[in-house]
Amino acid sequence: MPQMPTSPGKSDLDLLRLALACAERAKAAGRHPFGAIVADEHGNVVAEAGNNSMPPEGDPTQHAERVVAALAAQRLPREALARCTLYTSAEPCAMCAGAIYWCNIGRVVYAMSEERLLELTGSHPDNPTLSLPCREVFASGQRATEVVGPVPEMEEEAAAPHLGFWGH
């Protein structure tokens, strides 16, 4: 059964804003406007990443969440990753949720839902969205991954970098 969202704490909102700042930096660099960070249980940022999936420098697997999960896994042991939280501007796609799971990150907090993102991107070929909520991906695993999101008070703030980006 999919896990139900819990409410984010104040420090969660501050850390989520750092992920949104990564999304803004990605957009300013001409990349898709997504960003993510991983923080340890004390709120220390372990890794951060923006999206880099656009050619010619990027590739389609360089989503911010997948990249930041891999960076965190290179820096911390599995036991420590289980106590970490990945904060992201948008709900992780199926690929990214799988990477988060395989990296053993124990918690995810996201600002904007996949449904809201789809409203912003439409049928843009750079975002062929899968209709597979991250909770369903995590629920298919052998261990629990806590999910908080979407965060209503942050959803429009997370949507802002996408306005006008996808050509409509």
Image (spheres, grey):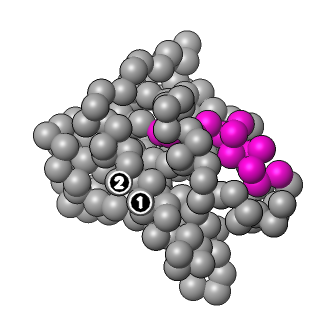
Quarter-of-image position of residue 135:
top right
Q: Quadrant of the N terminus?
A: top right
Q: Residues within 10 Å of mark 1 (few under 14, many from 20)?
A: many
Tag 1's secondary structure? helix
Magenta stretch holds residue 116: yes
CA distance separating discs 1 and 2: 5 Å
Q: Quadrant of the C terminus?
A: bottom right
Residue identified by numbered label 1: 21
Residue 117, above or below 29: above
Label 2 sits on a secondary structure element that is helix
**Residue at image location 25% in from the left, 47% down from the top:** 39
Please identify the dominant SS of the magenta region.
helix
Q: Residue at x 57, y 85 (%)?
A: 57
Q: Position of residue 133 (x, y in %)?
A: 63, 33
Three-letter code, disc 1 = Ala
Give the image quarter of residue 40.
Answer: top left
Q: Are marks 1 and 2 in contact (CB under 8 Å)?
A: yes
